[in-house]
Amino acid sequence: MTERGRQAVFSDRVQAYVRARPRYPKELATLLMDEFALTSGAAVADIGSGTGLSSEPFLRAGCLVSGVEPDDAMRAAAERELAAYAGFTSVKGHAEGTALRASSMDLIVAGQAFHWFEPAKFRIEALRISRTGGCLGLFWNTRQHEVSPFMSEYNETLLRCCTEYREKWGGRDVRDRRAPALDTVFGSGRWRETQLPNGQSLTLDLLIARVESDAYAPKPGHPEYELLTEGLTELFHRHAAKGLVELQYRTRIFLGRIEP
């Protein structure tokens, strides 16, 4: 499915996305800016910016961020969530046609979005809009399944209750899944990975919303939805401390320069 095709997946998940998706570490922007010798005021294109979660660290670092998003509902949410940042510009576009000016961006990023792109076409568009030798950072918040009994059982619940997760998303490491597409964009082996710790504390209501925000999650009315919510509720009550459970992530960052 292409990035434009993802609109049908997320248009009715926006509220859950805003409420319960994890933020990104504040160090993310600094890491990428230092890597490419960028300073405050750098122009950043956030491709597939969704509700604005991936734009916010760069806005906090003083960058001028163009959030490129094809889905109207998600783009409107970003405009509301980031209204306090004068450096944010909302753009209707997609990875293969951003609507941004040629040679206008110092850094191109995509958070939890690159897997929806058409890699070869995105590479062409990234080179077109870049003015700094194709500086690119792609990142995902990936769950750490083995760090606690709760995290392990959370993954087992998804595997048991979400057919699409089990068949299409579960099991393989993000690096293994995305390496061919990364090679297409950067050139074979011309990228590297780094990581940052991340996590979120969730009530039961937010834990359910967190899963509802995922593309693979069954929606209310689907036969698997009740099974999923029952499984999450049982899991929460076994592991909660002071009314919260901890979802633990690593923010996996794949970065490099795209050479013409």
Image (cartoon, rainbow, N blue to C red):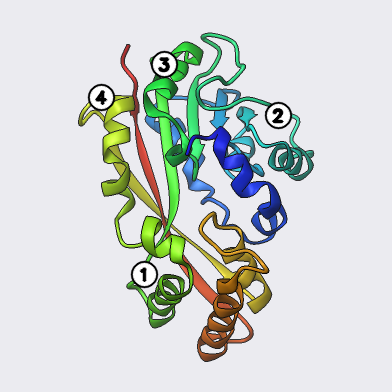
Residue located at (64% from left, 61% from top): 20
Residue 124 is labelled as: 3
Residue closer to the observer: 103 or 112: 112
> Residue 121: horizontal and vertical position, in percent?
42, 21
Residue located at (51% from left, 87% from top): 239
The disc labelled 2 sits on which kind of residue? Ser
Report if the CB atoms under discs 2 and 4 are less than 8 Å apart.
no
> Residue 22: horizontal and vertical position, in percent?
57, 57
Residue of label 1: 145
Q: Earlier in the sequence, mark 3 or mark 4?
A: 3
Q: Earlier in the sequence, mark 3 or mark 1?
A: 3
Secondary structure found at label 4: loop
The disc labelled 4 sits on which kind of residue? Gly
Residue closer to the observer: 117 or 225: 225
Residue closer to the observer: 227 or 175: 227
Cα distance between the residues tagged 2 and 4: 30 Å
Secondary structure found at label 3: helix
> Residue 72: horizontal and vertical position, in percent?
72, 36
Residue located at (69% from left, 60% from top): 19
In this rendering, the label closer to the viewer, 2 or 3 = 3
- Horizontally, is 82 left or right of 151 in the view? right
